[in-house]
Structure formats: structure tokens, C-alpha cells
Image (cartoon, helix red, strand yellow):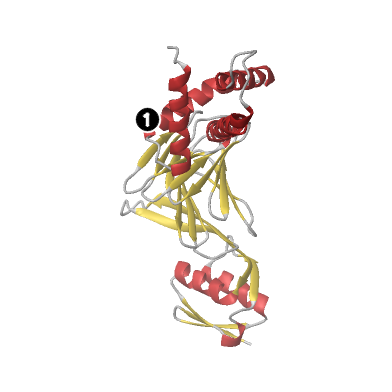
Amino acid sequence: MKKINYKNIEVFVFKLWEREVSGEKVSEKETELLRQWNKNAEKDLDTVHMQESRGRVLSGLESYFNSAGKSIPVRGYKKYAYQVAAAVVLLLSLGGFLIYNTLIKPDIYIAESREKIIHLEDGSVVTLLPGAELTVAKSFPASTRVVDLKGDAVFSIAKSKIHPFIVNADGFSTKVLGTVFKISQSGKSKAVDLYEGKVAVSSAGAPVSFLKPNQKWTNFGVAHTTAVISFAPDKTSGKSRSELLSLSFNDVPLHEVIAVLESNYNTKIYYPKETENKKITADFTGGTVAENIESLAFILGFEVQKKDNTYILKK
């Protein structure tokens, strides 16, 4: 590496400091160079190197002092001391900024107006859809590969039998060992579409769902709700046909349960208005439309009347 004299190093230090405090945007090329430098630097980072680095910083300050045996006028000593103190504060502050940015601060990738492809260090590839944001900790990849996602993205995960890959999204997480899947987030509606492999999806207040290829996990935009939908081509038309495999509610208001049932079963359900906020906990997995509505009526202590494709729940 070409040696730079101390004067030019001072300029370099001040330029970095100005960029840090001004919040000037760092280019993708600079970000990639810093990432590569950080990856190589971390391999040799230990206590000895930290001590040596501190020594180099302090020795670099020696040029601010007069040579040995040369006295400093008392009148100028105070001003001189302030200059030295300012230089020390600047270098230490800059050191803190650099350490934070290179060793601690997570990498954040944003797809603004178009898709953005991210190649992670473990070999995984993430395609961020417009508006999405991916946060990757400096420790990635560790024993557990964890990233945070805002918005929608498609993940192609490098396979590992011992290092799971976890995507923390808004209110739910997806855990895999190696697969291809898509996460969608729109307001309260959350979904995971699986294309290859297997994934486990967990969310607050709901049981864990395990997906197979061509299956989808969703909450239908309702908190504490989970459903798994299977997609398969229709033998007659060749078009994709969906089937609701499981549907669970955990302490969900009745009016939201009814809305999900009506939407998925293409039916109409009437019930007493005064019970719309009653909390329902139920698992409707495996039953027919009529059986599931009968189960709901049983939970509520209601009777059921059916007319055409309409159900009426009565006390």
C-alpha cells in the first residue's frame, strides 16, 4: 500500500468526518468495498491489533508537540493544549464512527423504484421488490442466519442443514434451511408463498405453520389468524386451483372471523349484532363449509339455519 504522509492523512480524516456528520449518501461501490474490507479485517481483529492501532493513533499525535527539550511559552500553552485536545477528540470520535460503521452498523439495502438483487455472503440471493428494505447484521452469516425485511421480497436461500435462515418481517417470521419463497406484506395482510423446499412460519398468538411447495401461508389481514392454502393445477382446465387446508383463530373478534369465513367459503353468514366483538378461538382445519359453521355456532351456543348458500346464527 502506498505510504501517505501525515498531512494528507489529516485531510483524509477530516473528509471522512465531514461525510459522517453530513449524512452524505455512500455509493453502492463504496458500500461493497467497505463490506469486503470489513470481511477481511474481521479475520485478524483481536486484542493485540486493537492495542497496536491505539498506539498508532497516539503516535500520530506526536507531530503536534515540539521536539524534546524545546519549551513552550506559557502564554501559548493554553491555546496549544486546546488544539491537541481537539485533535484527540476528533480522532477518537472518528474512530468510534468508523468502528460503528464497519463492525457494528447493519447493512441496509433498499429497492426504491425497481427491483434490487442482493447477494448475501452465505450464497443466498434476495430480490427486493420496489419499496422493500432488507437489514443484514454485520455478524451475518452466524450460526443462525437472521435478516429483517420490510415490504416484499423473493428469497433463494443457500442450503445448510445446520444453519437455519430466518426472515423477521412485520409481526411474523419465516424459518428455512434452504429453499425458494416469497414474502408479501401489504398493510395488515401478510403472506408467504413457497416454491421449493420447506419453511416454518410463526406469528404472535398463532400456531406455527409448516409449508410444502405450492402452498401459501397467510393471515388474511387479521391478527392472530393463520391459514395454509394449497395451489394445484385443475386437471380439466389446467388453471391453478386453490384449496384451504387449515384455518385457525386465536382470540379473534367474531366479526373478523365471519368476514374470513364468508370470503373463503363464498357464502353469507348472519349473526346477532351484539356479539360481533366476542373473541373466538377455533381451528377449522379439515371440515366442510357446513361443518365449520356448525362448529362456530356450537362455540357461541347458537343454532344454525341454512337457506341456499346463506347461514343464519341464532341464539
The quadrant of the rendering that contains the C terminus is bottom right
The answer to which quarter of the image holds residue 92 is top right
Residue at position x 65%, y 60% in the image: 205
Residue 8 position, x and y percent, is 43, 21
Query: Badge 1: how crowded within 10 Å, few (<14), some, or many (20+)?
Result: few
Residue at position x 64%, y 67% in the image: 282
Q: Nearer the viewer, residue 312 or 273?
A: 273
Residue 198 position, x and y percent, is 54, 41
Q: Can residue 242 be seen at all in this image of the molecule?
A: yes
| In this view, 289 is above or below 115 | below
Residue 296 position, x and y percent, is 61, 74
For badge 1, the amino acid type reads: Lys
Q: Can residue 142 be seen at all in this image of the molecule?
A: no
Residue 272 position, x and y percent, is 58, 86
The quadrant of the rendering that contains the N terminus is top left
Q: Nearer the viewer, residue 112 or 45?
A: 45
| In this view, 293 is above or below 97 | below
| In this view, 228 is above or below 313 | above
* Image-based side of 239 in relation to 12, left or right: left
The residue indicated by pointer 1 is 29
Q: Nearer the viewer, residue 119 or 56?
A: 56
